[in-house]
Every structure is written in C-alpha cells, then in structure tokens.
Image (cartoon, helix red, strand yellow):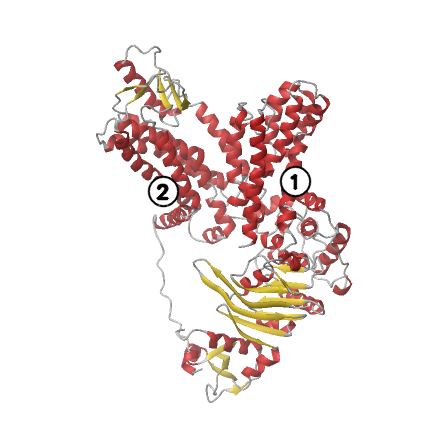
Amino acid sequence: MQLVLESLGKRYPGRGWALSEFTLTLEPGVTGLLGPNGAGKSTLMRILATVTRPSAGRVQWEGRDLSREPDALRETLGYLPQDFGIYPQLSALEFMDYIAAAKGLEPRAARKRTLELLELVNLGEARNRPLGGFSGGMRQRVGIAQALLNDPRVLIVDEPTAGLDPEERVRFRNLLGELSGDRIVLLSTHIVSDVEATATRIVVMGLGRMIADSSPEGLLEQVRGRVWELETDASELDALRTRHLVGATLRRGPRVLARVVSETAPGAAARPAEPSLEDAYLLLQRAAQPAAA
Amino acid sequence: MSERALARAGPALPAVPRGAGLGPIVAVAWAGVLDRTRRPAFALGLVFMLWLGQHMLPPAGSAYRTFVMDDEFRPLYNAAWVGTLTAILTGLWFLFVGFYQAKGSVERDRRTGVGQLLAASRMSTLAYVSARTLGNLIAFAIQAAVVALAALIQQQLLAEDRRVDLAATLLPFLAITGPLALFASASAVFFDCMSWLRGGLGNFVWFFLLGFLLSTSGMQDPKLSASRDLTGARAVVNDLRATLAAQHPETTSHPPEFSMGVNLSAHANAHPVKTFHWEGTRWTAGALASRLPFVLGSVLVVLAAAFLFDRFDATTRVRAERGRRGARATTTEVRLPAVPVGQLTVARRGAAFAGVVRAELALMLRAPSMWWWLGVLGLWIAEFATPLSALRTVVLPLASIWPALLWSQLGQRERRHDTGPLLFSCPRPLARLLPGAWAAGAIVGLLVGAPALLRFAFSLGAEGSSGALAGWLSCAAFVPAAALALGVWTGGSKAFEVLYLFAWYVGPMHHVAELDYTGVTTARSPVLWAVYLALTVVAYALASAMRMRQLRS
C-alpha cells in the first residue's frame, strides 16, 4: 500500500508556487508533516485529498494516477480539512448520515458506525443537538468522526487538534496511534508535540519545499550536541535572541531559563541539554530561510 | 550556519494614535467600497446599467419606444431630458438591483469574523451601521457618476440638441437618484441587521415592499402629495405634461397620458414619434425640499438598524438554533470510548443513488420552520378545493414561489457552509452529489404541487389538464436546474432569489406565456416546450461544468 508523490507542485495565479518539487512515498504508519504557516502543508493535503489538482507532478495511489482517477483514492479516503464547515441546522447524527450517504456507505452499517464514532469522540450525548450550537472543539470532533466513517485506508488530517482542549488532544493522539497499524496516516500540524507523540516518520516543510524527511530519532541526531540551556536575566533575553536561535523559555522570577540552539556554548553559564524535536524543527526552519532573512 | 545568521532583531512597533471623529466611519466605509467595487458583480452591474441607459434613449426611427406621451410625443433629447431620464432609471436600478448587490455587507462581516473584531472595538453600533450605509452610498455614487458621464456622451451621439448644460444633466442625479441611492443603501444595511431579513426571506420582503411603495407613489396621479413620490418621477412627469399641453394644445388627453417601458411597435417607422422641447425641472429649494422626506426616512432607517442590531452577538443565533430543535445545551463529559477503535463496525460501500437523494432531501427539508409546513398544508388544501381554472391561474403560481428559498440553497450550500472540502473528497461528487441535489429539488417541487398533479392526472380529459400536468412536471425539473446553475456559478443564493422573483411576478402571476416557467397558467406552444426543455438541460450542464471546474481547481 503506497501513496506516491512525484515532483508535486502547485501554483496559484498571482501568488506563485505554494508547493514545488515535492517528492515523497507514504506507507502505512503515521507520518507527521511539520511546517510553519504558509509552508504549503494545507496545499499538499488538499492535493492528496483530491480536492485540489497539482499544477505539476502527480500523485499515484496503488499505481493509479489521481489526476485521472481521483475516485480510486476517494473510495478509501478519510479527510479532515484544516477549515471545514457544517450544516448548522443538522444534528451531529444527521450530519454524519449525510456524509455517509455522500461517501456511498450502506446506511444501516453506517448508522451503527456513526453511533460508535460519536461515542469515540465523546459526542454520544450531544448527537441529537444541532451543530449550530456546538463549540469549536465539538465541531472539530465531528470532523474527526466523519473522517473515520468509511474505515479509511488513507487518513489525511490537517491540524486536527486545533480547538481541542488538552485532554481531548491527548485522546486524539492516542486514537491516531491506534489507527495507524495498517493505514497510511498523514498528520499535518505546526504543533511539534502532536507529531512527537504519534509519528514514526517526520517530514518538515518550509516555503513550499521539503526540507527534511526523517525518523524522529534521525531529526534528534541532527541537533544533538547543539542544544544548550542558559539562565539569564529577562532583560537580556532580546539581546540573546539577536545573537542565537532561542527556543523555549521558562520564567523563573526575574530570570529566564532559555533553550538555545548553537554550535558553541552561548555563554559561560550555559549547560548542554538533551535535544527535543522542537529544537531540531527550529534549526531546520532557520536554515531553510532565505539569506536575506 | 553562522551565529549572526541566526540573529533576528525585533524592532519596537510604534504606537498608533486612536482615530477620532468621522475617521473610523470613513475607513470602514471605504473598506466596504473597495470590497464591493472589486467584485465582478459591480462591473457587470455597471455595464448593464450603461447598456440599459443607452437603449432607453432610442434614436429617432427606432423600432421601439420607451417614453411616449399621448401616444405620439416625447421630449427632445437635450441635456435636461437625457440627464433626467437616465437619473430616474439609475435610481430605479438602485432600488431594484442595487439593493440586492449592497445587501450582505454586514452578513459578510459576521461570516468572516471581521464583525467580531469591530464589535470588540470602540466603534459604536451607530457608527458601524452608518459606515456600512456610507460604503453602499459611495459605491452607488461611483456607478451613478459613470452613468452620468455616459449620459453626457450619449446626448452628443443622439445629436438632437447638442447644447451642453451640465446643471440640467447632473442635477437630476443629485435630486432624484441621490435620495433613492441613500434609501437603498440604508435599507440594505437595515435588512442585514435583522436576523430574519438578512437571508432569502429578506430578498422577497424587499421585492414586495418595493412593489407596494411604487404602487402608492402615484405616477399617473398628478394631485398626489409630493411626499409619496418615492422615485421623483412624478414631479418630472407633471412638468412634462404642462410643457406638452402648452406647446401642443391639440393633445387629446388632459393632462396628457404617458407610458414608460419598452414598447415595440411594428409601425414605429411609419409613424415616427413627435418631439417637443423641455427645459427640465427647475430644481428650486421647494422642489429639492420635496425629496427631503426620503432622505430623512433613510436616516431613520439607519437609526432603527443601529437600535435593533445585535452587534455580532451570536447568542441570539445559537439560542434560535437550539430552540428550533428544543435541545438544551449540556456540557459533555470526557469519558473513555465505549468501543475500541479496532472493533468499530465497518460500513461498506453499498448505498444506491437513492441514498444521496434521501440525504439531500432531508437536508433541504430540515431548514424550513413550522410556518413553512403550515403554508404547504394550506396550499394542498387549496389545490384540492379550488376549481381547475383557479388552480391553474392562482393556486399553482402561488405554490411555485413557496419552495423558492429551499431551491435557492441548491448549488451554493457547499460554499456558503464551507463543506466543499468534505464533500468533494467523497467518491463521484459530480455523478452522485450534483444530480442528487437536483433530484431533491425536483421532489420538493412535486411535493408542493402533489394534490394538483393528482387532480390533473385524474381529469386528463378536461381542457388544459394534460398541459398543466406536463407543465408542472417541467417546472419541477427546470427550476431546481436553474437554481443549481445560479448557485454553483455565483456561490450565493441571491442571484436565483432575485431573478426568480422577477420571473415569477411577470410569468406565472401575470400569465406571460414566455416567462411562465410553471407551464400551467397558459397553453404552451411546442416551441416554448422545446425552449424550456433546452433551458433545463443547459442549466444543468452549466452547473455540472462549473462544479467540474471547482473540483479541478
């Protein structure tokens, strides 16, 4: 089971290339797609979900070109877009029935699965309430449920944890882990901890291009020995930022504990620190920025 | 990578002084103007206005007439008449079309979230409503300015009287078009501010309200109070009548009658229209003051809008949506899933096309309130109880307007509710979802006219029954196809709602065969049957083509 992306590119009129020369082969497991806003993640996801056509390159699913045969993938696709709407006058149950019909699922089994999925995303009790009254997090959970409706072999989820509270976010990560067995799961996010918890492979994007494709361990190795912790006065933080790449900071009264990514120790008091994916991600993004920046 | 390359300086942002006075109003208004003028509908509307303006002034020897007095006279095309007629037409355009173009600016702010930002700002509700009204007014003023310029050019091209008199050409735009533009601007914002008027129902209400206001403005009654002369045309007509009677005492009617509108005449060339000289309305202080009630009325409309506007507070909407279903808001508790992911029921593919139709129908019929269903019940009773002739000429035309707001959702729901990404990634969206939506629309049409269809079917021998039966079936096919096409192409419901209203008013209600899409009020010719069949196919094909383009974007 393979989803093959060959030299994919997408050009929007008047806006240039949002995605270019993107080549990747996806196999069962969770692949995390990391990148800042505007990196081209959503464009890539929309192409894979067959709702946008690439301007260059092609996507092949089980050897079939999706530009010519998009239904080959749609039959077995689960897609949670970054931004999606609902019909406010429908209840969660009715909305799921509607999506099930659109996906062409057998109604009785689809209804049973719908009820189970709504329980799974913790909306069992709210299933008969109109979606118009749902909070952002509840709508997001409806989105997650509809993506799983047809037991997809390919699951594409774009910023799935946006709007979820911390507890729901953990539940969703666990859910992705359970789903990943024999499915291709592509998880796009700019929240590193979401990927850290679930992905077996990480693709980092920047400015519409791939800038890294590695296992989490591989990314950590790239930054090992270059991460430091330094406690400094809060007033000196800006000055530190002008000299070094500063990651997470932690307030300690008037002092700040800062993580610094640097080839050499950023100060006499700096201590070597265990690298995190966030450190590796920051370093990759900074390296990918144009020289003028 | 060098250490310096990693450096990123963060310059302090300068403090922005607060806007004062009319500054914020003008800024919000101007943003609205930019938003409107950059939409294709603005340019299209302007082109149509210019086309209409040109054709409403037919040169001597044309095969049609637009304004005739006493069946044989019209004013000479001088600066005054060209300017005045164009100004009246422009004002009417703003009332009939401009209103619909302007309506939606507040709703757009609500949908895009800009409203939340403005609501949280220091801007008062009155200032916001005034800014939106001003934005509409400026957009209208831009259109009127272009039309006025075109009028000056057209006077030269018509060449009946080439003397340039800027005051005579332009003052009517100020005195006649101005108050109408303001009234349409303010009303559009008022409708936007009312929850029950901001949707399709508001489009219908405006149409009927306008019909009422114009019918009471007494164009043919010279003695009526000037304060009821909404369009300002009656003052002009009175002046024209007096001028004509003075220059041509032989006119047969006193005061001389007039007709306005496109009047095709086979003998127009054989009997060319006579002209008389008119210097234009003297816009004295008194004449201008007669337009003041409409300006003050517009100001009152703005004040009422500001008073009733919810300032983007979603409470009312959420309450209404919850209340409609009688559901209570409850906090969901976090619990562990009852069924492990691996053991969920697997739903295989297997639903027939009927499943999509059923789902689309359920979605359509979920929207209307209980009152809509009571209306359907009333129509059904009328369809059973009235004589066949009344059924065809009164009841079914009324029945054809009843589902209009359901039909108008077709083709644009995916964009309006942003469900496109979910639905277009489903299998065969073009081959299943689009025809499913059309079929659901057709079923709604059949449902509303079901008793009539039964009666026609059981009385096929009666005169006109078979034609009416076939007519309503064709109506149920044609209208959803047209709605689908307009919905997919425009991405909104307004175009269908407005066009459908006009077609309904002229066709089924006034029994104009060519525009009677129901096919029940008059006997259709074979050619007309073919035309409606072709229109149905073309409309559906257009919807498919655009949807295909959306899928391939």
Q: Is B171 on the left or on the right of A135, as rendered?
A: left
What's the CA distance linking mark 2 and mark 1?
A: 43 Å
| Amino acid beneath label 1 | Ala
Of the two numbered discs 2 and 1 on the same chain, state the one appearing first in sequence.
2
Q: Secondary structure at mark 1?
A: helix
**Of B353 and B24, the residue lying toward us:** B353
| Amino acid beneath label 2 | Ile
Q: Is B509 on the left or on the right of B426, as rendered?
A: left
Point out the residue furthest to the bottom here.
A268
Q: Report the chain holding disc 2.
A: B
Q: Mark 1 = which residue?
A: B439
**Of B367 and A248, the residue lying toward us:** B367
Q: How many marks?
A: 2
**Of B354 and B36, the residue lying toward us:** B354
Q: Secondary structure at mark 2?
A: helix
Note whether B277 is above or below A182 in the view shown: above
Q: Residue B138 got which mark?
A: 2
Same chain for labels 2 and 1? Say yes or no.
yes
Note whether A88 is above or below A16 in the view shown: above
Examine the rendering and report whether any part of residue A38 can be seen.
Answer: no
Q: Position of residue B514 (x, y in %)?
A: 53, 27
Q: Position of residue A5 (x, y in %)?
A: 58, 67
Q: Report the chain holding disc 1.
A: B
